[in-house]
Structures are given as C-alpha cells and as structure tokens.
Image (cartoon, grey):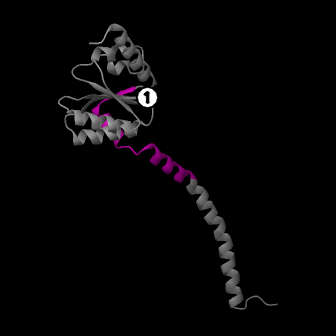
C-alpha cells in the first residue's frame, strides 16, 4: 500500500497531466485481461495519448478546479481515463476501433476542448476525418480558384492560337 507522500505525488502528477489535456475519455474496463490492457495502452500511445487506471477519488481530486472537473467529479464503478493534448479525432478513432474488438471496454463519457460529450458524441467524433485529411481538403478548396483562374487565362491564349492557325490554313491572312 502506498504511503501518503506517494499518493500526494501521484495526485499532483495526474492533476498536471489533466490540466494539459484538451481531450479526456472516460471508460469502463471490467473483465479485461492483461494482454487486452497492454494492447489498449499501445493503441492509445500510437494515437498520441495516455491511458491510466486511477481510483475514482484520486481522479475526482485531481480534476477539481480544472478543465475536466465536470467530467470526473462523480465517478462510479471501475473507471479508466484516456487523454491527449493532440488530435482528439485520432484518439477517439483508436479507442472506438479497440472497443469494437474488445466488448469489455466501454465508453462512459468524454470531454473535448472543455465540453462534456456522451457516448454518441464520442462515436460521432470518431467518424470525423483526421486533422491531416481536413487540412488537405481545405488546401484543395483554397487552391481550386487559383487553378480555375490559370486555366481560364491559358484558355484565352489557346483560343487565339487556334483562330490564327485556322486563318493561316484557310489563307484568310494575305500579305
């Protein structure tokens, strides 16, 4: 059993990590095997997040007066948290895929950029395109008018060249 100074150190560490996190997902993990837990942690790390199993009282105290306070204030049952300060969509996708493969892992709630969301909101978030995909679509939208302008400007010169070529072929230009 941990002594009080060790518990206080764990509490402060969790508090600082939760304060930095923009996205927090709360989940249940009953009846998970060690191998499943290992795979889950690997999945979360691959998505740029962190995963912890913490006591409900410690999570509640760590989140007091913080961004995740509303989400973690009244925890019940066996709970774990996955959090990230990076891309929330990547973490939501990774956890959703894992939850489909392992029914013992279930979502309870989440917090994205200060707003608490329910299980449906997490699944909707997971169905969104990734940040990179959104950036590429945005760049395409920004770039499309420039491409159309260049095509139109080239069209004038091309049309002029076609008219001159036809005039030469039909001897319309006399010297």
Q: Quadrant of residue 153?
A: bottom right
- Residue located at (37% from left, 36% from top): 45
Does 129 lie within the magenta span? yes
Q: Which residue is mark 1?
A: 22
Residue 166's place in the image compared with 21, above or below, is below
Location of the C terminus by quadrant is bottom right
Secondary structure at badge 1 equals loop
| Residue 124 showing in the rendered view | no
| Residue nearest the viewer, comparing 56 with 67 | 56
Specify whether 102 is left or right of 18: left
Q: Main secondary structure of the magenta part?
A: helix
Residue stretch in magenta:
115-142
Location of the N terminus by quadrant is top left
User: Where is residue 16 drawn, in percent x and y?
Assistant: 44, 19
- Residue located at (65% from left, 74% from top): 158
Specify whether 48 is left or right of 79: right
């Amino acid at each position: 059993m941990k002594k009080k100074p060790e518990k206080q150190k764990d509490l402060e560490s969790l508090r600082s990590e939760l304060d930095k996190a923009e996205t927090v997902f709360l989940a249940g993990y009953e009846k998970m095997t060690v191998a499943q837990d290992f795979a889950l942690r690997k999945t979360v790390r691959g998505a740029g997040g962190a995963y912890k199993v913490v006591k409900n009282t410690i999570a509640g105290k760590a989140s007091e007066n913080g961004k995740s306070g509303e989400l973690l204030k009244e925890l019940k049952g066996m709970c774990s948290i996955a959090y990230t300060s990076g891309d929330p969509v990547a973490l939501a996708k990774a956890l959703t895929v894992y939850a489909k493969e392992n029914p013992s892992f279930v979502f309870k709630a989440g917090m994205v950029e200060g707003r608490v969301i329910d299980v449906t909101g997490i699944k909707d978030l997971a169905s969104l395109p990734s940040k990179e995909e959104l950036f590429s679509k945005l760049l395409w939208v920004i770039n499309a008018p420039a491409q159309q302008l260049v095509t139109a400007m080239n069209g004038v010169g091309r049309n002029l060249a076609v008219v001159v070529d036809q005039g030469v072929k039909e001897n319309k230009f006399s010297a």
